[in-house]
Amino acid sequence: MVKIREKSVKTKKKRYLCTIEQKNYVEMKEKILVTGGTGFIGSHTVVELQNAGYEVVIIDNLSNSKADVVDSIEQITGIRPAFYNIDCLDFTALRLLAHKEPDIKAIIHFAASKAVGESVEKPLKYYRNNLNSLINLLELMPQFNIQGIVFSSSCTVYGQPDVLPVTEDAPIKQAESPYGQTKQICEQIIRDTVKSCSPITSVLLRYFNPIGAHPTGLIGELPNGVPQNLVPFITQTAMGIREQLSVFGDDYDTPDGSCIRDYINVVDLAKAHVHAIGRILQKKQLEPVEVFNIGTGRGLSVLELVHAFEESTGVKLNYRIAGRRAGDIVKVWADPKKANEVLGWKAQETIEDTLRSAWNWQVKLREKGVQ
Ligand code: WQD
């Protein structure tokens, strides 16, 4: 059981985290609001923020995740984050939260719709949700002295880069989907807001392909319905939930004909957010809006990933070569130099351990009767 205790010291009230049993006090860092904090990347980031000593408040509308993720986070860290079932589209609810949770110093904004295919069918849902949620937060921040925002962006903004590996100053291309478009527009909304002398600053993290799960197997990716992304489809096929994996095309201009991506371990990705928060709060930013590619710097083809899964887990995968998927880009992987040298973050996990963590998560879900 963990309680937050106020312990007055000479200069100012400090907030301490103490475990009742051990009675040891660890000075708690600032309070961080994580929107979408019960989601795949959000939940892993909450764990890493707590491990780094931050106090975390989660808001999530549970449209694509479950509230019991908060229990799993507590099981992992021993600290239960505050959780509110709030939609970022509800400005009044956000204001009430800011009054209820004073001293929020920064925000990590994950809450957004993120299915590429769905965004093509329902563009207005994506524009309304992804843009208005961000606008609400940006309006709120100066009113409550919230210093900065870390924004969950995506390598999708690059489209098919002309030069690989792709750096942060690569040209932003016409997005392949409304989802990708919303990421580009949100980045611009943040830039324009900061430029308008708003006191806030921002770090934009452009994720490559997040995969894997927490090594405890207590949190991971839990897609609604049929998985769109490769790795959850692989693990569900390996578990027998899906009949067969379709490899979307082997006739691309790549060594084995299948598409190439930069697959980043979700715990590594979560740690990048802790670095970004530190940059904002310690006022280390070199400019008010900073951009970082969060990838490994290594490209893997779909077929290489399938074979790596089989070798690292010992589980044979039933797959076939199918036709290309509309909207897929052929190859993209990051140049992570700036993130390594400026953000001070570097991917640590191997692809083999990452795929094993994804499979371990799938096995745990089966044991819990979830899938
Ligand atoms: C990877 C590769 C598919 C499924 C998307 C978003 C991106 C980010 C990550 C949020 C592609 C192939 C897939 C399958 C397959 N999302 N594939 N069979 O499309 O690179 O990126 O997710 O941040 O913004 O665009 O990821 O996992 O869907 O596909 O062959 O059943 O796997 O064709 O080449 P993608 P993905």
Image (cartoon, grey):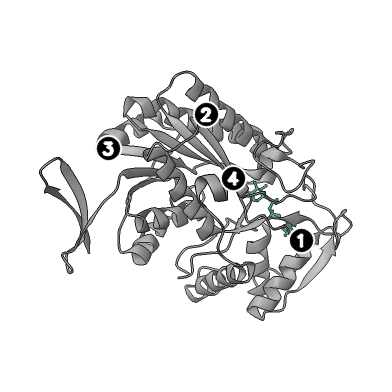
Sequence order check, earlier mark of 3 and 4: 3
Q: Check disc 4 and report the residue beneath it.
A: 338
Whichever of callouts 4 and 1 sits on the residue coming sooner in the sequence is 1
SS under mark 4 = helix
Type of amino acid at the residue the image marks with label 1: Ser
**Percent of width and height locating residue 77:** 34, 63
Cα separation, mark 3 vs mark 4, equals 31 Å
Label 2 sits on a secondary structure element that is helix
Instruction: Name the residue that disc number 2 marks.
Output: 190
Q: Which residue is mark 3?
A: 103
Please indicate whether residue 367 sits to the left or right of residue 172 in the image: left
For the residue pair 158 and 9, the one nearer the viewer reads as 9
Residue 301 - label: 1
Q: Earlier in the sequence, mark 4 or mark 2?
A: 2
Q: Quick check: marks 2 and 1 in contact, CB under 8 Å? A: no
Tag 2: amino acid: Ile
